Amino acid sequence: MANSILMKNIKIKFNYVTLYLLLIALLCGFIKYALYVTFIILFHEIGHAFIAIILGYNIKSIEIFPFGGMSKLDKPLNTPIIHDLLIAIMGIAFQLILSLLGHLLHIDYMFLKINQTIMLFNLLPIIPLDGSKILFEIICLFLSFRKSINFYYISSFLFLIIYLIFSYKYILSNYLVIALFIYKTIEVIKNRKIICQKFILERCLYNNLIFKRVKSNNEKIENFQKDVKYYYLIDSKLISDKEYLINYYFDY
């Protein structure tokens, strides 16, 4: 009941470009296609929001763009890996449910085809698609957060090159999608140091972080992993990474 009330309070916004293209589609006779795409994107984003709320996170807003959606969540970077994996996967899972219902109810073949295309497209490991987020969380199981971020944008560029080779088309929409991929990947590269610093600072500023694994080996700060709680042996006393970081940043 509480979850359904929270879902009602989510702000769903349609980007101005989206509304403009819907109007153009209406005037050009492609309104059915445009509405199908918009509905599928919205349903996909609701999947992300639904599981995020169940896991206890707040949803700031859902914004629908012409070529995808964006759910803004109020959650730290030190979220458990399983939580972030579930949030990333659930949009695609909702589309699978939509596809199953579509086949059972014999919905328009065009709708099913669009849904399948968007679903498979989202699995590409290119920033900001869900496939890249899923890959990032899996890498975080084995590498430090800093190295995982580096792997994140390098793999995104590599798969973007592959996408360009095999899906190059002389159409405006494809150019716009490629431009978005490049912009988002460069954005991660430019902000990677800030993101890594925020990841570390959260550990001494947040009180309710959840950690699934524990290590007690006086690890270097730059080698911190997601999901791992660290302990330090200082002057024969065992202290948590939070205490260590507070002393490191604020003890003058």
Image (tube, rainbow, N blue to C red):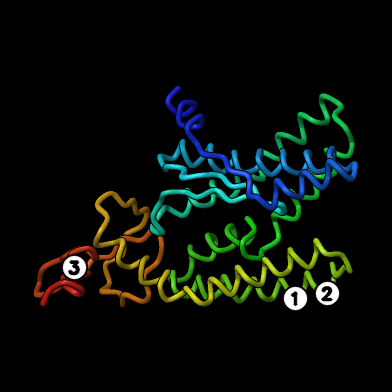
Q: Between 6 and 63, which is closer to the camera in this rendering?
A: 63
Judged from the image, the secondary structure of the residue bearing numbered disc 3 is helix
The circle drawn on residue 204 is: none
Residue at 57% x, 70% y is: 152
Q: Which residue is mark 3?
A: 246
Q: Which residue is mark 1?
A: 161
Q: Between 124 and 80, which is closer to the camera in this rendering?
A: 124
Instruction: State the separation of the CA atoms marked 2 and 3.
Output: 49 Å
Question: Neighbour class for label 2 at 10 Å: few (<14), some, many (≥20)?
Answer: few
Residue type, label 3: Ile
Residue type, label 1: Ile
Q: Quadrant of the C terminus?
A: bottom left
Residue at 38% x, 55% y is: 76
Q: Locate residue 192, reporting x and y percent.
A: 47, 74
Q: In the rendered structure, which disc, 2 or 3, sits on the residue that comes first in sequence?
A: 2
Q: Between 223 and 69, which is closer to the camera in this rendering?
A: 69
Q: Is residue 10 above or below residue 159?
A: above
Judged from the image, the secondary structure of the residue bearing numbered disc 1 is helix
Q: Is residue 138 above or below residue 13?
A: below
Instruction: State the separation of the CA atoms marked 1 and 2.
Output: 6 Å
Q: In the rendered structure, which disc, 1 or 3, sits on the residue that comes first in sequence?
A: 1
Q: Locate residue 229, reporting x and y percent.
A: 30, 60
Residue type, label 2: Ile
Q: Locate residue 244, reporting x and y percent.
A: 19, 69
Q: Which residue is mark 2?
A: 165
